[in-house]
Amino acid sequence: MQRDQLNFSYLKRLFPNLEQILYTGKFTSLNEFDKCTQLWHQAGFQGPFFLIKLTDQCVFIILNQNSTQDFIRTIRKGLTFELNKGTQWFYFNFQDEQQKVFNIWFQEQQDFENFKVCLERIVK
């Protein structure tokens, strides 16, 4: 079985209404912004990253290598986000429904660029 088929089978168990995997990233790490201290800290989620299309919505998920709890967020039209590309760092910054601010660090530039294209298509 190819890796794409394995990923689809696994994600289909988590999301029975899965229609399509739009993006797959090899490795990402999640950081959360503390509004009181104005500092970023690791949120405890690291692993492969997926952008998936369900029957009625799109979500992104980090399959957490640190625990059995995965990071899952719905992507809505009008999502507040920015994509930052430094010389060695690639981040997707966003605010969720609870007004928490996160960033997802991409290890590889190509993963970042591919994700950017997919995300921009969805939120338009």
Image (cartoon, rainbow, N blue to C red):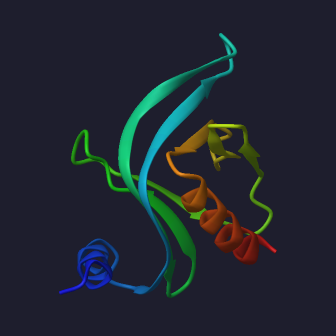
In the image, is 96 to the left or to the right of 24?
A: right
Q: Quick one: which residue is furthest to the front in this view?
A: 87
Q: In the displayed structure, does residue 2 sit left or right of residue 77?
A: left
**Split into 4 quadrants, where in the image is the C terminus?**
bottom right
Q: Position of residue 86 (x, y in %)?
A: 72, 38
Q: Which one is in front, 29 or 112?
A: 112
Number of numbered discs on residues? 0
Residue 40, placed above or below residue 109: above
Who is closer to the viewer here, 46 or 96? Answer: 46
Find residue 90 and report its horizontal and vertical position in percent: 64, 44
Q: Please determine whether, in this image, residue 31 is positioned above or below residue 111.
A: above
For the N terminus, the quadrant is: bottom left
Outermost residue toward the left? 1
- The residue sitting at 56% across, 44% down in the picture is 104
Q: Residue 79's spot in the image, x, y percent?
A: 74, 58
Toward the top, the furthest residue is: 37
Query: Residue drawn at (60%, 53%), measured in percent from left and top?
Result: 109
Snapshot quadrant of residue 11? bottom left
In this rendered view, identify the residue nearer to me: 91 or 99. Answer: 91
Give coordinates of residue 105: x percent, y percent. Answer: 55, 42
Query: Residue at coordinates 23% horizontally, 42% vertically from top-left?
Result: 67
